[in-house]
Amino acid sequence: MMRIDKEVDISGGRSAGSTLIIVLGFLFAGFFIGQLVGALSAMVLAVLNGLELGNMMEDPNALYDYLSLTQVLFTQTLYTLVFTIITPWFYLKVLAGKTIQHLSPGASISSKMVLMAFLATAGFIFVNAYFIEWNEGIKLPEFMSGFEKWARELEDQLAEATERFTTFNNFGEFLVGFVAIAIIPGIGEELLFRGVLQNSLHRVTKNKHIAIWVAAFLFSAIHIQFYGLVPRMMLGAVFGYLYVWSGNLWYPMIAHATNNGLAVIIAYASQSSESEFDIDEAESVPLVLKMIGAIVFLVMIYGFKKESNKQNSLL
């Protein structure tokens, strides 16, 4: 295992500044191409299911009435694959001349550290409830009322989309949702934002903390949710430190999949039991759970860093 305080070089012989510009270009291009692929696949499936093109042009949201949940998750998976897996893989392969394995100089995986990463992430979910509550309660000044109105409306639309993605009719749909929402994004988003972007930022700034937080900000901003910006950024920073301390991209991937996976599991369990518990609604999370979560997170994240140092000292 190896710390990556001295960044992993994925420049392909280019300067640090040029590398970062190219990576950012790939990031935004991949985002829009992924969105296009996902949207086109949804349109094709909806038409095959009977939607008339004229109706779709009048009301683009009508296509979701002609798609099953599995088909919606399939289109979302295509977007994720293009944006977060194919895009960074293509950059590494073609422009950097590197393999994905190059991003993890600490190639060995410790089961103890996997458990710590899992528990730290599970604990942080409850800690993040505070940031969710604070972020949702932000009141902008009057001169930004137009932006605030737009941001609130977008938040409501995304909340509806999230509910659509996580309302499972049976266990089979739950499994498909788990793969589409937890596993694939957990791997892909860490590959792109921590593996490629964070390392590129690290090489420019020569400061791991700046690289971690800027990558975390961009990771959150690309989701286009102003009222979820801070909690997602905090989560991205946790993933960034797991990567820097361990030198192994698998740990933030596991942590990311844990965060998303637990949210999917809680959503499915809530539907099955008709419980009103919602991890994204801070007020529904009991104070004692927030306190326990904070303790678990602090103990586990400290243990992860300490174990990383121990492993590194053996090299």
Image (cartoon, helix red, strand yellow):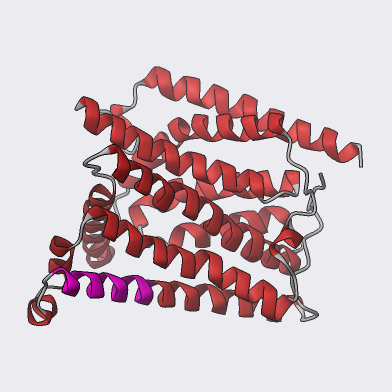
Residue at image x 19%, y 61%? 67
* Left or right of 270 in this view: 303: right
User: Relative to 112, does residue 186 appear above or below in the rendering?
Assistant: below
Q: Which residues are magenta?
A: 35-49
Residue at image x 28%, y 59%? 72
Image coordinates for residue 112, horizontal then vertical, percent: 70, 29
**Quarter residue 78 falls in:** bottom left
How many numbered marks does the figure carry?
0
User: Relative to 206, does residue 258 appear above or below in the rendering?
Assistant: above
Comparing 225 with 167, the one in front is: 167
Image coordinates for residue 66, horizontal then vertical, percent: 15, 64
User: Relative to 231, does residue 140 appear above or below in the rendering?
Assistant: below
Image coordinates for residue 160, horizontal then vertical, percent: 21, 52
**Quarter residue 172 falls in:** top left
Image coordinates for residue 179, horizontal then vertical, percent: 43, 49
**Magenta span: helix, strand or loop, mainly?**
helix
